[in-house]
Image: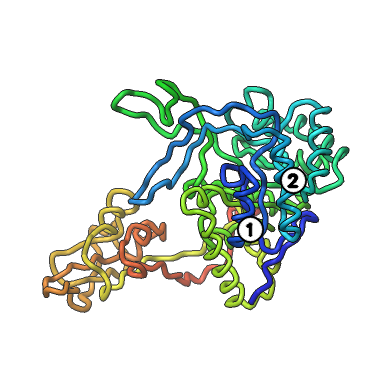
Amino acid sequence: MADLSVNMAGIESPNPFWLASGPPSNSGEQVMRAFDAGWGGAVWKTLGEPIVNVSSRLGAIDYGGVAMAGLNNIELITDRPLEVNLKEIYEVKKKYPGHAVIASLMVETKEDWRDIIKRCEDSGADGLELNFGCPHGMCERGMGSAVGQEPKVLTEITSWAKEFATIPVLIKLTPNVGDILDPGLAAVAGGADGLALINTIKSIIGVNLDDLTLRPTVGAESTNGGYCGPAVKPIALHMVGALARDERVNIPISGIGGISDWRDAAEFIALGSTTVQVCTAVMHYGFRVVEDMLDGLSNYLDEQGMPSVNDLIGKAVPGFKEWGELDLNYNVVAKINADTCIGCQLCYVACLDGAHQCIHTHQGPCVAFHGESDHGMNPRIEVLAPVNHDPNGNALFVPSVDEVECIGCNLCALVCPVPGCVTMVPVDNGKGRESWNDRMAKGEA
């Protein structure tokens, strides 16, 4: 069994799976149940001056039969007294000394930061996560993303926390910026011990077309909220990778955003995350989702011959390049497996209307294209094997690919409902590696 223990900026954790700050980490009772289920750490729901939340406060997008593919919330920080939260942090650490407990914080003045940091340390918290990402409610009060979007302010408050704290300080970044490097480098400049990202994305989840109210509704009104869940994973992966590959970011990262299973977690770790934080998946399925995450990640590491999860951290980062560095001479073409094709013609329609018109369908035997063609209008063709048939013996006309015209965009493989039926196969064109930057350097671009 691979070793899943990690050290995140000096915070020891039995595994990389942490609860993200949010409803699942709102109380000591919840955090203790999470630790019993197998979670390695928890970032407490953000502490500060308790606020009054609204009702209702959650909205979601369902897609392809999957509920909560994207989740929007207009909930703010804790509405429970600070004294109660600190007492529960103390109780959790006393009962689970080997687990990571991080206090998420959001206050205004320098004296407020000094006071709350001291009180969190006295409660036994292993680390602090400064919430500079909340995109609604708190930012209107000069906190949350109002700080995360202002690098100079972010650096200053980070330096305050580092001045007052004796435990590690993580900075939670907002994705609502033009370039994630700006707040990331500002946190590094302020002395942060680690980064956590992404926080939620500013959003409106939708409009109820029956009464034209925004969702979720508070009476007849609503506001923009924070978007999270599986739908934001690609955005989060990009921002994590952008920081991890920058040599100026020399502190560890805790990855957040759409992590639902062990594969998601492994991708974040491979792109530079030391720990991963999960919220929406727990809100959807409960704390026990971590069981699959633990087993799946451990099995994957074993299969890869990696004795520790630390061996996976950042392994995919070297492959993250700027567009101008990519090989312009690398080519792939689509191949359709006639034996598994069900004749749905989705690849044909997608290529015809949405791509490069290099897939063709025929009311006759399957054909393949060879040689030069006039965009598929006058190709030389060769009759191949008979068409495929369905279980009732009906002929299924398998589309064919004009390989000369195929530019390897992947669309046909993406829309095909049969796994492995359409594959993208590399083509050796005899040309060496050459990028746009290479051509620019030679004056050929």
Amino acid type, mark 2: Leu
Q: Nearer the viewer, mark 1 or mark 2?
A: 1
Work out whether mark 1 precedes mark 2 in sequence or the reverse, and give the earlier one. Answer: 1
Relative to the observer, which residue lies in front, 103 or 152?
103
Mark 2: few/some/many CA within 10 Å (<14, 14-19, 20+): many
**Which percent across, then down, holds residue 437?**
62, 53
Quadrant housing residue 48: top right
Residue 440 visible within the image: no
| Label drawn at residue 192 | none
Residue 94, horizontal then vertical, whole percent: 76, 54
* Picture layout, residue 418 above or below residue 87: below
Q: In the picture, residue 189 is in which quadrant? A: top right
Q: Which residue is mark 1?
A: 35
Q: 50 above or below 20?
A: above
Identified at 62% across, 48% down, the residue is: 20
Q: In the picture shown, does residue 412 fall above or below 85? A: below
What residue appears at the point 43 percent right and 21 percent down from the top-left corner? 221
Q: Is residue 54 left or right of residue 402?
A: right
Q: Amino acid at mark 1?
A: Phe
Local packing at callout 1 (Cα closer than 10 Å; few below 14, some 14-19, many 20+) is: many
| 1 and 2 marks in contact (CB < 8 Å) | no
- Label 2 secondary element: strand
* Residue 282 shown left or right of residue 321 in the figure: left
Cα separation, mark 1 vs mark 2, equals 21 Å
User: What residue sits 23% from the left and 74% below the top?
Assistant: 382
